[in-house]
Every structure is written in C-alpha cells, then in structure tokens.
Amino acid sequence: MKQLKKIWHALAAVALFFTVSHANAIPVDMELSLVIDVSGSVSGDEYNLMMDGYANAFRDGTIQNNILSTDGGDVGSIAVNAVFFATDFYSTALDTFSLLDSAASINAFADILDTFVRPGSGGTRVYNGMNQATALLSADNGYESSNLVMDVSGDGTSSSSATQSARDAAAAAGITVNGITIGSLGINDFYTNNVITANGFAIHATDFDGFSSGIQTKLRIETGGGEVPAPATLLLMCTGLLGFSLARRRRKSQ
C-alpha cells in the first residue's frame, strides 16, 4: 500500500510539473525553427551570403509588421531558433528560442544571425537537422503555439528514406515543414518529394545571391498568416528569383 501511494504521488508530481510548465509557457503566434545547411558544399562566402539573407529578411518592414500584427494571429509575436546541420546537427546558442515581440527584439535577432560564426562543416544529412528541429519544437521550450513551422534551407540532398522519416515525424508532431533550395532544380525536386510536409511549400533560388530574395519571400508567407500559395504561384516566385539572380550577375559584370 505504501509503495502504491509513493507511485501515485510521483505520478501526481509529474502531472503537476507538466501542467505548471504549460501554464508558464509564453503564448506566441508561431514557433519557427530555421534549419540551415552548413555542409562542405557551402563555401565560407556562401555561408555569409546565406546568413546575411536571413538577417536582412528579419529586418524587412513587411516581415516585421507581419510578426507584430494581430491580424494573422492573436498575440503579435513569434518564437524563433536556428538549427545548423551537415553530417550531423550542431548544438549552438541558437538552439534556444528567442521571443520576437518588438522591432528592437527582431533587429537584435537579425544582428545575431548576421554575425553568427559558422559552427562546422561536413557531409549533407538533411534529416539530422530536421530531427533536431522537431525535438526542439516539441520540447518544453518556454513557448506555446498551435502553429509550428520548420524552415529547411540547403543546397544538397541526403538519404530519401531517412529524410522522409524525419518529415513524417515532424508531421506527426503537428509541424509544417517548408523548404528553400539553392542550386539545381533537382534539389528542389528532392525537397518537394522528401522534405516538405503535405501542407508545406518550397521555394528555389538558383544561387546564393538569389537566396536573400527567396528567404524574404518565404518569411513573408510564413509570418503573414495567409494561405500557402498554390504551386503555380510558387513557379512564378521561382521565376522571379531566377530573374533577380541574373539581374544581380549583370550588374556585377558591368
């Protein structure tokens, strides 16, 4: 009987812990995890272009207004973190979610991204980054939202079966997985077939110069609270990115 009481009290304590943890979580309109490829195919200059792209996207006025607006949500804030992956994921200070609830906090997060030291390099295993992001989004991370989004960027592919398993695990946890690919259209096909969830979408940039425009477009969609665009609309976006990239190349050559 005493042993049974001990078990009962232990279970009650666990239930109380999770109730209190949930009650203390800060409500936000979205929990967003940026999953970033730092494999060996990404050069140092390309890494800097990519991180500049993320930083400038968060500095974008439309994206800031979307985050702080209550039109697409109830709170006017989001929580965001970043996961870096190559052969495996890297644990960094950006694993911890940051609360973006003011222009100052958004700009501060952008500054961190802009100067964040590359954590490593290696092969490309997209699924390891995705699995880590799923774990962090599903954990008691201090924030609470019914809108969980994983934003995977990369210029390579990995095992289809392992990546599909990571996608399915994310979907089972209620996470929408979107993607932005860099390089050949074959990488975009890989993301479409193996990375993004049924309710997600992918945008393609032909090179790292075009990534900045692509991630800005993507974050505008994700923070806007609207419908995911139809595939035809995404094709137009991709065409626009191709033109943006070519225009920048022409300007550089002049």
Image (cartoon, rainbow, N blue to C red):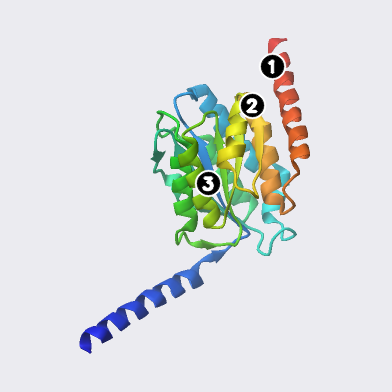
Label 1 sits on a secondary structure element that is helix
Q: How far apart in space, not on screen, are marks 2 and 1 (Cα)?
A: 19 Å
User: Farthest residue in the top direction?
Assistant: 254
The label shown at residue 127 is none
- Residue 229 in percent (x, y) is at 75, 45
Q: CA distance from mark 2 to mark 3?
A: 20 Å
Residue 125 vs 93, above or below: the answer is above
Quadrant placement of the C terminus? top right
Q: Is residue 55 visible?
A: no
Tell me the number on the disc at residue 249: 1
Residue in front for this viewpoint, 92 or 86: 86
Give, as a three-letter code, the residue at label 1: Arg
The residue identified by callout 3 is 167
Residue 216 image offset from top left, x and y in percent: 67, 38
- Residue 40 image-quadrant placement: top left
Which residue is denoted by mark 2 in the rendering? 185
Picture coordinates of residue 208, whole percent (x, y): 60, 25
Answer left or right for 77 relative to 173.
right
Give neighbour class at mark 3: few <14, some 14-19, many 20+ (Cα, 10 Å).
many
Residue furthest toward the bottom? 1
Residue 176 in the image: above or below residue 153: below
